Amino acid sequence: MTFREATVADLPGIVRLLADDPLGSTRETPGDTIPDEYFTAFTAIQNDPNNTVLVAEVAGEVAGTLQLTFIPGLTYTGGERAQIEGVRVAASQRGAGIGQDMINFAIAQARARGCRLVQLTTDRQRPAAIRFYQKLGFHPSHMGMKYHLTDS
């Protein structure tokens, strides 16, 4: 398994991964041809030095993905934090340690950058994901809230 920054060629596969669960299937639009909005967002991520999309590759195939964002802040004495989002592992690869390795890789990136903490959110409807993150040392310290600006 190798980790690398995603390329635009990976985008349809990444979107398929994001859509491959009950929640993602309601909000993502996978397919061989994906909406332009994904390309716009991916380009913005690529052009932002505080953002990256990583993929885990197994035997030449994208087996997992996550987005890692570095957020400067005034709290923690002006400490930077890392935000992990959009973590997905291909259904055929789940249970093989890819998710754990991806999270550990992201934590190592945050540590190397001098971040004070790593944070993530997961939906309460994903109890297996909650157990997974807790096993890796994440603690449910806050209650996340969202305000959706659109219905789509």
Image (cartoon, rainbow, N blue to C red):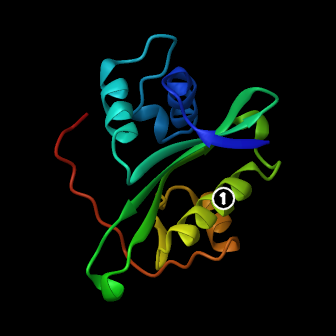
Residue at 42%, 17% (x, y): give it: 34
143 relative to 47, above or below:
below
39 relative to 87, above or below:
above
Q: Position of residue 95 (x, y in %)?
A: 80, 49
Q: Position of residue 106 (x, y in %)?
A: 59, 59
Residue position for label 1: 105
Q: Nearer the viewer, residue 121 or 126?
A: 121
In the shown orientation, is residue 115 left or right of residue 131? left
Residue at 47%, 74% (x, y): give it: 115
Residue at 38%, 54% (x, y): give it: 50
94 relative to 39, above or below:
below
Residue at the farthest left position: 149
Q: Does dot 1 land on a helix, a strand or a loop?
A: helix
Q: Nearer the viewer, residue 73 or 95?
A: 73
Total number of numbered discs in the rendering: 1
Residue at the farthest bottom position: 77
Q: Quadrant of residue 3?
A: top right
User: From the image, which quarter does the N terminus lie in?
Assistant: top right
Residue at the farthest top position: 33
Q: Quadrant of residue 133?
A: bottom right
Label 1 Cα crowd, 10 Å radius (few <14 / some 14-19 / many 20+):
some
User: From the image, which quarter does the C terminus lie in?
Assistant: top left
Q: Position of residue 100 (x, y in %)?
A: 72, 58
In the shown orientation, is residue 134 left or right of residue 124? right
Residue at 51%, 11% (x, y): give it: 32
Q: Position of residue 103 (x, y in %)?
A: 64, 59
Say if residue 130 shows up in the picture.
Answer: no
Say if residue 64 shows up in the picture.
Answer: yes
Residue type, numbered disc 1: Phe
Q: Nearer the viewer, residue 59 or 27?
A: 59
